[in-house]
Amino acid sequence: MVPPTGDGGSPAPIDRPILEFLQTRLQATGQVATALITDAGGHLELRVTLTPSYYPDSVEEATLAVRWYTNDDFKIHYREVHPKDAWECRWDRHPNPHNTRDHFHPPPTAPTPGNDASWSTDHRDVLRLVLDEIEERIRELWRD
């Protein structure tokens, strides 16, 4: 077994072509205001700001941070900022001491340990799953 890394990521390098593909795909949707590949805190990732008009006024900002590794490990972190708190969750695939390699850190605080899960190895399928779950969250926000 490969040991976990200190940042909760993968021991493999980031797969920049996958991040570029996801960036292009996300920029083509009305749900995304910006999608930029950045070197945030020494970690290459795709930083996505979701379009504010999709959300009720109670959401100040909604973001998605994506790291995809050459061994198909990933970390996808969704976060909403509200006036008094944040609501977040995370889809992960990486070696770690707290869950199986595939796992989900549920909302509203994305606690560790998370829930064991099973994800596709295809980045397009994982992106579709995440976007579908975000759409469901947006519907829930508008119902409340």
Image: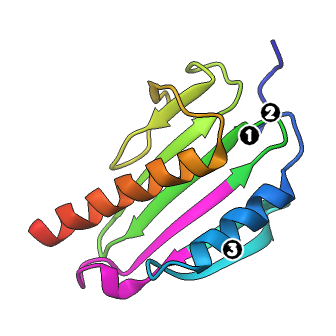
- Would you name the residue on which mark 1 appears? 9
Distance from disc 2 to disc 1, alpha carbons, whole Å, reads 6 Å
Residue 5's mark?
2
Residue 52 lies in the magenta-colored region: yes
User: Quick one: 55 or 22, which is closer to the camera?
Assistant: 22
- Would you name the residue on which mark 3 appears? 24
Residue at the far left in the pictured view: 144
Residue 125 location in percent, x, y?
55, 46
Label 3: which secondary element: helix
Q: Residue 84 vs residue 96: left or right?
A: left
Q: Are marks 2 and 1 in contact (CB under 8 Å)?
A: yes
Residue 124 location in percent, x, y?
60, 51
Residue displayed at 36% across by 52% down: 133
User: Quick one: 12 or 79, which is closer to the camera?
Assistant: 12
Residue displayed at 45% across by 62% down: 79
Judge the density around disc 1: few (<14), some (14-19), many (≥20) Cα neighbours within 10 Å. Answer: many
Amino acid type at image mark 2:
Thr
Residue displayed at 29% across by 71% down: 84
Label 1: which secondary element: loop
Residue at the far right in the pictured view: 13
Amino acid type at image mark 3:
Thr
Question: Mark 3 or 1, which is nearer the eye?
Answer: 3
Residue 124's mark?
none
Magenta segment boundaries in residue numbering: 49-66
Q: Residue 89 vs residue 101: left or right?
A: left
Distance from disc 3 to disc 2, alpha carbons, whole Å, reads 28 Å
Q: Residue 89 vs residue 108: left or right?
A: right
